[in-house]
Amino acid sequence: PIFKYAVISDTHIRPSGESSSPWKTNLLTNDRARWVAHTINAHSPDLVIHLGDIVHPVPHLPTYSSASKVAQEIMGSLSSPYYLVPGNHDVGDKNNPTVPSYIINDEYIEDFHRYHGPTFQSFDHGDIHFVIINSLALNSGLTEEAEQRDWLEDDLDKHRGSRVHVFSHYPPYLHLPNEPSNYDNLDQPARSWLLNLIEEHHVEAFFAGHVHQFFYKRHSETDIYNLLSTCNLRQDFANLFRVEAVEEYGRNDAAKLGYCIVDV
């Protein structure tokens, strides 16, 4: 390979000792994130990208700032440069009446800037053009949505013909491009807009998080990877079992946790 980089997602870092849930697994999230940072350092990747839900407390909670400071400490232990993608726990949920928490707004975006950096950006490394987007801003009607839309169209146009890897918290879809909107995909019309851009610019790879499960789809010429969480299976659902359920109804199924190393 020419170089390698690491991708992690959904660390859900908390203030030290805090858990808003009765599940004991949730108390392991910070130590698991530290372990992931330590093991990634052993791989010596050129860079690391975090796909969002960096912290668990959502922005309107008073614990958001303290969790963000713990996240800074953990991410700062990485030996490689790292880049952060905003997740719904980091900037608020997408603008959809079915979501369970407060939706994204300008104040939450500013909080992300304060603790974590830009919400969308691009850069080059080796022969790859890396593109980080704020998927929560899509369909939001916020100024950020229009600014990001203009920026992304211009950025991809300037890098037409380049090898492009895109990083988003939300996947465009899980099963079919025309599937109904749900908590785990991008809503229309932004979904079609983004997929059209991916197709037009022959994006090589698209990485997403959010669902704490691994999915792979081939969309036109693009490999879409939906990655695992480092901390637990999603806390708002449990696996179903024909026999007695495993520990915490599968929330602590460590074999389904992880991160990835990408060889380019």
Image (spheres, rainbow, N blue to C red):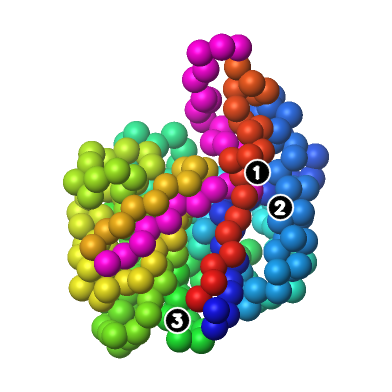
Magenta stretch: dominant SS?
loop
- Asked if the residues shown at circle 2 and circle 3 are in contact, with their CB atoms under 8 angstroms apart, the answer is no
Q: Mark 2 or mark 3, which has the lower sequence index?
A: 2
Q: 16 left or right of 126?
A: right
Q: How crowded is mark 1: few (under 14 residues within 10 Å), some or many (20 or more)?
A: many
Numbered circle sitting on residue 128:
3
Disc 3 residue type (three-letter) = Ile
The Cα–Cα distance between marks 2 and 1, rounded to whole angstroms, is 7 Å
| CB atoms of marks 2 and 1 within 8 Å | yes
Label 2 sits on a secondary structure element that is helix
Mark 2 or mark 1: whose residue is earlier in sequence: 2
In the rendering, which numbered label is found on residue 33?
2
Residue hosting label 1: 231
What stretch of residues is rendered in magenta? 221-244
Of 116 and 187, which appears nearest the observer?
187
| Three-letter code for the amino acid on which mark 2 is drawn | Ala
Residue at 63% across / 64% down in the picture? 115
Which is closer to the viewer, label 2 or label 3?
A: 3
* Image location (x, y in percent) of residue 54: 60, 54
Q: Are marks 1 and 3 in contact (CB under 8 Å)?
A: no
Question: Furthest-right residue in view?
Answer: 17
Q: Residue at x 29, y 43 (%)?
A: 175
Q: Is residue 198 above or below residue 246?
A: below
Query: Which residue is rendered at x = 23% and y = 41% of the image?
Result: 179
- Residue that extends furthest to the top in the rendered view of this protein: 243
